[in-house]
């Protein structure tokens, strides 16, 4: 295969450090490193450009995607209420569309003829990246080294880097595989490969354990306009800064830890631990507001949209007409989601303490247990008789049949 220039999604970790010289050895091509800043933190980004050059890349492009990550993916997804398999707030999945799109844009700008990623052949991310590549630039060749090369362990990669005299801070004793961005951090590997093994405290990196969290509850007031966060405790906040602040507050109170066995798209089950403190707070607040403003049918439909959208995001189908349709439905429903919610945080628990909205369908005058003049309880008899009519007819038929 004749490849002259390839843009590699580069992180500076062991895998992508080895991919750079491997591409040059096996494809005899120029390698351009692309680094997406999706909020993984200064520590992960420190020195990454020099690492790429030391590995053999001709250049390294670091692109700040944090704002579009929040505005174009996180906030719209929140409006749909998407949660994968009842628990996972889609942290890794949601970042992939903006990363893949920026990688494609760079490749087209620089005249590259190939794209490369470091995803393994066992995971979901290979599908997410390559699905995006196919939708955005089908003319570009895709190289997936984990599906081609002979390496099968961390030690074999370390040996290869030593042979190529490529410096690395990685070691064979690294236990966990982690992925971090503005929304969450995930952990896999180590003792987590045994589902009978409880995760040790060394797994968790952002959040305090609920046992070590403060003994006093914290309260946060969140204000929303059409489903999007606008203020925290009465102060206007920018999207990226808002999530960073909620992550900080939530982490202190042990919020957002989950330990799940999930169904991967490729067919196998995997066990992972995720920390999503700010996201857990935001989702709880929006659900609290939904309960106030959505009628029964609207809430049911939003739950259906959320289920389908979670599946779509997890499966890497962001650049599809179905995404546009589901997002339009979620956004339309969220037109009603304006109001304020007070959230109580206490030792890993998130509780809606107060909620109000100009679009609230809750009426104390109707719901009160005291005397009222707006609801005639006698009317319920006719409603129940009609509502249960099919059951009544079925029972009468059975009686007639003996």
Image: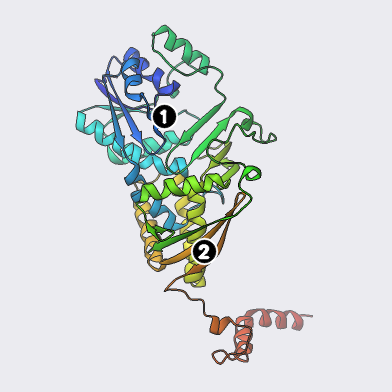
Residue 347 lies left or right of residue 301; in this view the side is right
Q: Nearer the viewer, residue 9 or 136?
A: 9
Q: Residue at x 41, y 38 (%)?
A: 128
Which numbered disc covers residue 288? 2
Residue 23 appears in view: yes
Residue 203, placed above or below residue 316: above
Q: Quadrant of the C terminus?
A: bottom right
Percent x, y of residue 365: 54, 84
Which of the 4 image quadrants contains residue 129? Answer: top left
Q: Residue at x 44, y 29 (%)?
A: 119
Residue 41 lies left or right of residue 377; in this view the side is left
Percent x, y of residue 21: 35, 15
Residue 294 appears in view: no
Percent x, y of residue 318: 37, 46
Q: Which residue is the extreme one toward the right?
A: 402
Q: Residue at x 58, y 81 (%)?
A: 367
Distance Cα–Cα, label 1 vs label 2: 35 Å
Q: Nearer the viewer, residue 311 or 212?
A: 212
Q: Secondary structure at mark 1?
A: helix
Q: Residue at x 46, y 36 (%)?
A: 180
The residue identified by callout 1 is 44
Residue 287 lies left or right of residue 42; in this view the side is right
Which numbered disc covers residue 325? none
Residue 169 lies left or right of residue 272; in this view the side is left
Q: Are marks 1 and 2 in contact (CB under 8 Å)?
A: no
Q: Secondary structure at mark 2?
A: helix
Q: Decide: few, some or many residues near mark 2? Use Cα within 10 Å; few <14, some 14-19, many ≥20.
A: many
């Amino acid at each position: 295969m004749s490849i002259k220039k390839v843009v590699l999604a580069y992180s500076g970790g062991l895998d992508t450090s080895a991919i750079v010289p491997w591409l040059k050895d096996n494809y005899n091509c120029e390698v351009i490193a692309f680094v997406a800043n999706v909020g993984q933190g200064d520590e992960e980004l420190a020195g990454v450009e020099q690492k790429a050059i030391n590995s053999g890349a001709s250049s390294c492009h670091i692109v700040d995607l944090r704002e579009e990550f929040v505005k174009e993916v996180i906030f719209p997804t929140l409006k749909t209420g998407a949660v994968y398999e009842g628990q996972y707030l889609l942290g890794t999945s949601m970042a992939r569309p903006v990363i893949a799109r920026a990688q494609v844009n760079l490749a087209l700008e620089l005249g590259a003829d190939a794209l490369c990623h470091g995803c393994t052949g066992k995971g979901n991310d290979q599908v997410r990246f390559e699905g995006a590549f196919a939708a955005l630039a089908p003319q570009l060749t895709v190289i997936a080294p984990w599906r081609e090369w002979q390496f099968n362990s961390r030690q074999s990669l370390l040996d290869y880097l030593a042979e190529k005299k490529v410096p690395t801070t990685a070691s064979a004793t690294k236990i966990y595989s982690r992925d971090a961005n503005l929304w969450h951090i995930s952990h896999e590997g180590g003792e987590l490969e045994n589902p009978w093994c409880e995760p040790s405290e060394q797994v968790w990196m952002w959040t305090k354990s609920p046992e070590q969290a403060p003994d006093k509850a914290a309260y946060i007031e969140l204000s929303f306009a059409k489903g999007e966060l606008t203020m925290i405790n009465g102060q206007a906040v920018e999207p990226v800064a808002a999530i960073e602040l909620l992550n900080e507050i939530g982490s202190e109170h042990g919020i957002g830890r989950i330990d799940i066995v999930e169904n991967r798209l490729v067919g196998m089950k995997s066990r992972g631990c995720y920390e999503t403190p700010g996201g857990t707070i935001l989702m709880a607040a929006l659900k609290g507001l939904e309960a106030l403003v959505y009628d029964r049918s609207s809430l049911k439909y939003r739950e259906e949209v959320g289920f389908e959208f979670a599946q779509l995001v997890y499966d890497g189908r962001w650049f599809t007409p179905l995404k546009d349709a589901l997002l339009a439905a979620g956004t339309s429903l969220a037109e009603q989601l304006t109001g304020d919610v007070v959230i109580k945080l206490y030792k890993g628990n998130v509780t809606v303490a107060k909620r109000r909205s100009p679009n609230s369908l809750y009426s104390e005058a109707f719901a009160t247990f005291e005397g009222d003049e707006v609801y005639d309880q006698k009317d319920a008899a006719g409603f129940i008789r009609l509502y249960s009519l099919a059951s009544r007819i079925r029972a009468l038929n059975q009686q007639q049949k003996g």
